[in-house]
Image: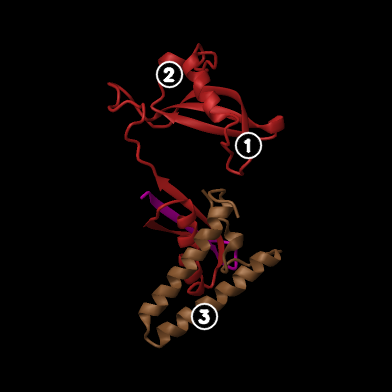
Amino acid sequence: MPVDVSQLTAYPASQPDSETEKFRSARIEKWARVKALLVDGDVERAKSLMNELEAEASARYRVLYGMETK
Amino acid sequence: MPNFTLGISFADEDGHLASTSINLVRADLAALAAAAETIVEAMDILSDGRLAGVSATIDIDTTGWTVQGTAGVGSDVEIGGRMIFRTAGSAFFSKITIPAFLKDAYTVVGGLIDPTIADVAAFILAVTGNGVATNHWEDIVSFDDGYEVFNGKR
């Protein structure tokens, strides 16, 4: 099944709604923190933050795919 | 946990596409999509192309399915049963070709598939009005016709 690429920060979303834009902004900021931690050599915390990114996205997809209600 | 394969496509300035695939294991579809999001976002930084699409296939465990365990004597995957379906309003067609089709059992004169045979009717019922879509994601709602095809060379 296709993944909803409009939700990804990699995707140049044409008309993202405010909630999506808020999510993307927070995600971009968190990615920057992951990279900063890697530059500092703190792989453990970087990995932990990356897991957070994935967990947050997973929660969003659970609603998007109807596995949970909001 | 299910095995998934991600198909990730990027387009270059000229619109040419290239894809890469990644196998991964996740608990469910939401976890898969989330993992895809994380991996593709990290990949995107390393690419100068534009993300064109992400798809996923799931390797489904068929244990317990009511399917035959061994191929029939003389079965040939090059013999196909091509079923043509229509979308709502008959605007578009879509085809599904059944490999190793039992042509002797399900075709009539001229190699046409007989939709009145219960086994054929059951397959049509399973496909139509059941969320099955064309390559462009229009809903398949009805059967048009079907016929025997041969895909190989002799």
Q: Which residue is mark 2?
A: B103
Inspect this view and state whether residue B18 appears: no
- The colour chain A appears in is brown
User: Which residue lies at the image location 32% right of the left edge and 25% below the top edge?
Assistant: B68
Q: Which residues are magenta?
A: B1-18
Nearest-to-viewer mark from 3 and 2? 3
| Rendering colour mode | by chain
Measuring from the top left, give residue B108's x and y in whole percent.
50, 12
User: Which residue lies at the image location 29% right of the left edge and 26% below the top edge?
Assistant: B71
Q: Mark 1 is on which residue type? A: Asp
Measuring from the top left, give residue B10's x and y in whole percent.
53, 63
Front residue of this view, candidates B153 and B84? B84
Measuring from the top left, give residue B15's x and y in whole percent.
59, 62
The 10 Å Cα crowd at callout 1, few under 14, some 14 to 19, many 20 or more, is many
**Label for residue A32?**
3
Q: Which residue is mark 1?
A: B139
Measuring from the top left, give residue B154's x and y in whole percent.
36, 29
Q: Mark 3 is on which residue type? A: Ala
Front residue of this view, candidates B93 and B131? B131
Q: Mark 2 is on which residue type? A: Lys
Q: Are marks 3 and 2 in contact (CB under 8 Å)?
A: no
Q: Are marks 1 and 2 in contact (CB under 8 Å)?
A: no
Q: Quadrant of the C terminus of chain A?
A: bottom right
Q: Chain of mark 1?
A: B
Q: Are marks 1 and 3 in contact (CB under 8 Å)?
A: no
Distance between the alpha carbons at the discs numbered 3 and 2? 60 Å
Q: Is residue A57 above or below residue A66?
A: below
Q: Is residue B2 magenta?
A: yes
**Res. B39 image quadrant:** bottom left
Distance between the alpha carbons at the discs numbered 1 and 3? 41 Å
Q: Chain of mark 3?
A: A
User: Which residue lies at the image location 58% right of the left edge and 74% below the top edge?
Assistant: A26
